[in-house]
């Protein structure tokens, strides 16, 4: 998958598409006017840029994603871990929980994910 570098506004725009896809481009422009206070040309400019990056597509006036929200945020997380923690997931988790405690329920959920991965692997 491509490495998508998005600014905060482009990411918010992609979130709007993911929340409502498939969506007519005119309806998307109305949502962006309401949620982002954008004029129609701004919406179409950002849409064009994200289509050029291969994240979204606009086919016959219907906008949808090429990359799902989960795929995007998974790749973004991998990129952060790779760049900031030398690819070490345990180092990332240790840094995260050193600043923010997790509940027993969250710890159980994480443990279930790990256990499920061990069974698959």
Image (tube, grey):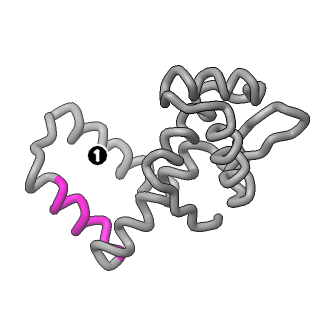
Position of the N terminus by quadrant: bottom right
Q: Secondary structure at mark 1?
A: helix
Q: Is residue 32 inside the magenta stretch? A: no
Majority secondary structure in the magenta region: helix
Residue 20 occupies quadrant? top right
Residue shown at 74%/58% (left/top)?
Answer: 52
Where residue 54 appears, x then y in whole percent?
Answer: 72, 57
Q: Quick check: 36 above or below 55?
A: above
Where residue 15 appears, x then y in whole percent?
Answer: 53, 37
Q: Quick check: 54 above or below 63?
A: below
Where residue 28 appears, x then y in whole percent?
Answer: 67, 27
How many numbered discs? 1
Viewer-nearest residue: 19 or 35: 35
Residue shown at 57%/67% (left/top)?
Answer: 3
Residue that sits furthest to the right in the current view: 60
Viewer-nearest residue: 53 or 42: 42
Residue shown at 73%/49% (left/top)?
Answer: 48
Residue 98 left/right relative to 116 = left
**Which residues are the magenta region?**
87-96
Residue 103 occupies quadrant? top left
Characterize the local packing of mark 1: few (<14), some (14-19) or many (20 or more) Cα atoms within 10 angstroms.
Answer: few
- For label 1, the residue is 111
Residue 44 left/right relative to 94 = right
Q: Is residue 94 inside the magenta stretch? A: yes
Residue shown at 15%/34% (left/top)?
Answer: 104
């Amino acid at each position: 998958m491509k490495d998508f570098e998005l600014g905060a506004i482009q990411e918010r725009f992609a979130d709007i598409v993911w929340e409502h896809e498939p969506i007519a481009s005119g309806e998307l422009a109305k949502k962006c006017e309401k949620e982002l206070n954008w004029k129609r040309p701004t919406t179409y400019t950002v849409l064009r840029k994200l289509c050029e990056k291969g994240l979204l597509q606009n086919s016959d006036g219907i906008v949808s994603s090429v990359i799902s929200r989960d795929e995007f945020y998974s790749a973004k997380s991998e990129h952060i871990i790779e760049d900031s923690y030398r690819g070490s997931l345990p180092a990332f988790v240790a840094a995260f929980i050193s600043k923010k405690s997790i509940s027993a329920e969250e710890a159980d959920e994480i443990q279930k994910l790990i256990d499920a991965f061990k069974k698959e692997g």
